[in-house]
Amino acid sequence: MFFVFICFRLKFAEIKIHMELQKIDLTQPFKAGDRTYTAKSYMSVQRWMIYEIVQNEMGFGCEFKDIVSTLQKVYDLANKQRFADIAVTVHNQLTAAAQRIEDRLHPVIKMCTLFVNYEGEDERFWTEDLAKEKQRDWEQAGIPAQDLFTLAFKSAPTLTAALSGILDSISKDQEK
């Protein structure tokens, strides 16, 4: 029995070693899957247009079309002077932003797929399928989410400044 326990413990330790995350240096190329990825400091016009939308998704926790839809609904309700319905609609949007869980690319991952490219990739164009392919590579390679979050937020200084202001405001409110 003791021998089986030791063998199990050794096998578990061996599996654990292979399951560790692959910390990456964001300034250097890194391997994920069969590809070598590099974070670029530039992107095509098409990717930049998507990047602008994804910044909003990162900030609000939902897709841009959902934000526009909610704003349109609030506008229509305001014209009808239905203020209680406006409050409910805004509350629902805020709650959805905080609790949204879906089978979709997280906005931070999506943003990184716009400028973290593999060797030989056509950098002019971007698709959801390409992004999902990159996400699979990064998941299988064990790239830490924190590294991708760092990279995404460093690329979006306006969003980072806005979030920093919100966090400062929350901290001040909690101190009272």
Image (cartoon, rainbow, N blue to C red):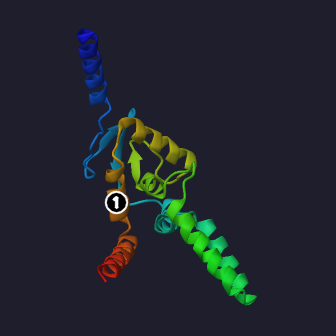
The residue drawn where x is 54% and y is 71% is 94
Q: Nearer the viewer, residue 95 or 129?
A: 95
Residue 28 % position (x, y):
25, 48
Residue 65 lies in what quarter of the image? bottom right
Residue 100 lies in what quarter of the image? bottom right
- The relative height of residue 35 versus residue 159 in the rendered view (above or below) is above
The residue drawn where x is 52% and y is 60% is 99
Q: In the rendered view, does 78 fall on the left or right side of 18? A: right
Name the kind of residue labelled 1 in the image. Ser
Residue 74 % position (x, y):
67, 80
Q: In the rendered view, does 11 fall on the left or right side of 126? A: left
Residue under numbered circle 1 = 41
Image quadrant holding the N terminus, namely top left
Pointer 1: residues within 10 angstroms few (<14), some, or many (20+)? few
Residue 95 % position (x, y):
55, 67
**Local SS, label 1:** loop
The residue drawn where x is 48% and y is 58% is 107
Q: In the rendered view, does 92 fall on the left or right side of 61? A: right
Q: Nearer the viewer, residue 63 or 175?
A: 175
Q: Nearer the viewer, residue 14 or 118?
A: 14
Image quadrant holding the C terminus, namely bottom left
Q: Nearer the viewer, residue 42 or 90?
A: 90
- The relative height of residue 86 versus residue 7 in the rendered view (above or below) is below
- The relative height of residue 62 versus residue 132 in the rendered view (above or below) is below
